[in-house]
Image (cartoon, rainbow, N blue to C red):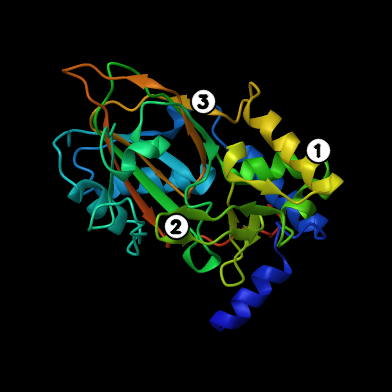
Amino acid sequence: MHASARAAHALAANPFDPENESAYRRWRDQKLRNHPSRVEELMVEVGDPRALTDAEHEAILQRCRKANMAIYAGGAREADKDIPRLLGRQFGLQRLDANWLADDDGISQLTVSGTGERRDYIPYTDRPIKWHTDGYYNPPARRIWAMLLHCVSSAASGGRSGLMDHEIAYLLLRDANPDFVRALMAPEAMTIPARSNDAGVARPAQTGPVFHVDPNSARLHMRYTARTRSIRWKQDAPTLAASAFLENLLNADSPYLFRATLAPGMGIVCNNVLHDRSGFADDPTHRRLLYRARYFDRIEDGAAVSTEPAASQASP
């Protein structure tokens, strides 16, 4: 089948179409059947993330297929920015988002910064970060599809990450009320206000959906932030109800919400899932440093969105 024909077929049978109930039910059953129930199920021991073995690569890929994320732990604990770069390449991640606070190579060093522009932005402080997906302020041409975090050194205390598969968030919203996902798929659902500096407007306002289905791959993308100062919701009842439900979901005790504190040599590989971070405290011998790489690519998993009925499998 030609690539364009395959894309058209995938979209026609896409489970993320709010009007396609049969495809959604098939996808939902498979998603819940295979999804991890404990954070330990996301973890993979690796020798060197810069050069994974075939078994290590497949283990990470399997977790990303099920939950859009994996947590690795290995022996590479030195300060080497090739770790996220070479790890990403092994999963087809090439196009880095060289955002304005990243280093010249496109990789950010997340650590407490007491000087310069970084000190005014929460990822470069020890304050908690609310739930979000990365690049929620980017325009559509620069959607962040994947992200890597690699821990070089951890804080003396705190810095715990929360993680939730964005596809699970979609599923729970749709199960609660299909109008929630319809509202959050609207092109004007969420606006990120412009960012200004002394020279004027540094980044224009960005209006767009929370959930977007890529027309080529039929994959689901999510852009979201729980920061009230960084967001304007469309002022209609369905959108406000959906955003309130999502906020409550992320602040509840959910079996689909995982928590982990990254130690040196650990990292997260993900398709830009929802995540947050608790506050932390450094001391003279423990200064938190993480490398962050954000990509315009999605993890290459070699699998299409499943919309076909599963043979002789019962629903959960």
Mark 3: give few (<14), some (14-19) or many (20+) Cα within 10 Å.
Answer: few
Amino acid type of the residue tagged 3 in the rendering: Arg
Q: Nearer the viewer, residue 135 or 200?
A: 200
Mark 3 and mark 1 lie on one chain; the one further toward the N terminus is 3
How far from the left and from the top, in percent, is residue 155?
Answer: 28, 21
Residue 314 visible, this orientation = no
Mark 2 and mark 3 lie on one chain; the one further toward the N terminus is 3
Residue 137, compared with residue 161, is above or below; it is: below
Numbered badge on residue 316: none
Mark 1: give few (<14), some (14-19) or many (20+) Cα within 10 Å.
Answer: few
Q: Find out whether the residues at labels 3 and 1 contact each other: C-beta distance under 8 Å.
A: no
Instruction: Describe the element under mark 1 as helix, strand or loop.
Output: helix
Is 255 situated left or right of 144 in this image? right
Q: CA distance from mark 3 to mark 1?
A: 23 Å
Q: Residue furthest front?
A: 198
| The C terminus lies in quadrant | top right
Q: Which residue is mark 3?
A: 38
Q: Nearer the viewer, residue 281 or 271?
A: 281
Q: Which residue is mark 2?
A: 301
Camera-near label (3 vs 1) is: 1
Is 59 situated left or right of 180 in this image? left
How far from the left and from the top, in percent, is residue 273?
Answer: 51, 44
Numbered badge on residue 176: 1
Going 62% across and 71% down the picture, which residue do you hit?
215
